[in-house]
Image (tube, rainbow, N blue to C red):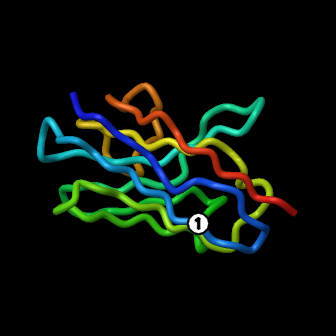
Amino acid sequence: EVQLVESGGGLVQAGGSLRLSCAASRFTYDDYTIGWFRQAPGKEREGVACVSNRDGYIYYADSVKGRFTISRDNAQNTVYLQMDSLKPEDTAIYYCAVSYHLLCGATWGLHDYDSWGQGTQVTVSS
């Protein structure tokens, strides 16, 4: 089973930037979707962005479109989430996850993701 490890979280002022990393040990299959999710206190986990390894298709939630950028480095088995123009409402624990059967952008389908990282805290102060 693949192991996912997130890093790069921290405390930043509103308007600032952070880059999160999701490092994978080894993927079970060549075709997969990597998703970034977040969960704020008292709220449900929500999808933020995803990328398909097969064709590079990328999808963003409306709440982050134009501010966040997802990218991948296949040689390093790492997916990044560049977060710019951060807002206090972006404060959450951010998770990455892998799905071997869910198409990026089709649905967030939390239960369709096969493995999850432990999460990294992002706090945006006003």
On the image, the x and y values in percent for residue 39 come to 64, 38
Q: In this rendering, is residue 9 above or below 93?
A: below
Residue visible at 51% across and 60% down? 60
Q: Quadrant of residue 16?
A: bottom right
Q: Quadrant of residue 41?
A: top right
On the image, the x and y values in percent for residue 51 come to 35, 57
On the image, the x and y values in percent for residue 68 come to 55, 67
Q: Is residue 77 left or right of residue 126?
A: left
Q: Tag 1's secondary structure? A: strand
Residue visible at 73% across and 33% down? 43
On the image, the x and y values in percent for residue 49 come to 48, 55
Q: In this rendering, is residue 74 above or below 36?
A: below
Which part of the image, by quadrant, shows the C terminus? Answer: bottom right
Residue visible at 54% across and 52% down? 48
Q: Nearer the viewer, residue 45 or 102?
A: 45
Q: Amino acid at mark 1?
A: Leu
Residue visible at 30% across and 37% down? 99
Count the marks: how many? Answer: 1
Q: Quadrant of residue 45?
A: top right
Q: In this rendering, is residue 103 above or below 41?
A: below
Q: Nearer the viewer, residue 32 or 77?
A: 77
Q: In this rendering, is residue 60 above or below 101?
A: below
Q: Nearer the viewer, residue 107 or 28?
A: 28
Dot 1, how many residues are within 10 Å of its Cα: few (below 14), some (14-19), or many (20+)?
some
Q: Nearer the viewer, residue 13 or 107?
A: 13
Which part of the image, by quadrant, shows the N terminus? Answer: top left
Disc 1 target residue: 18
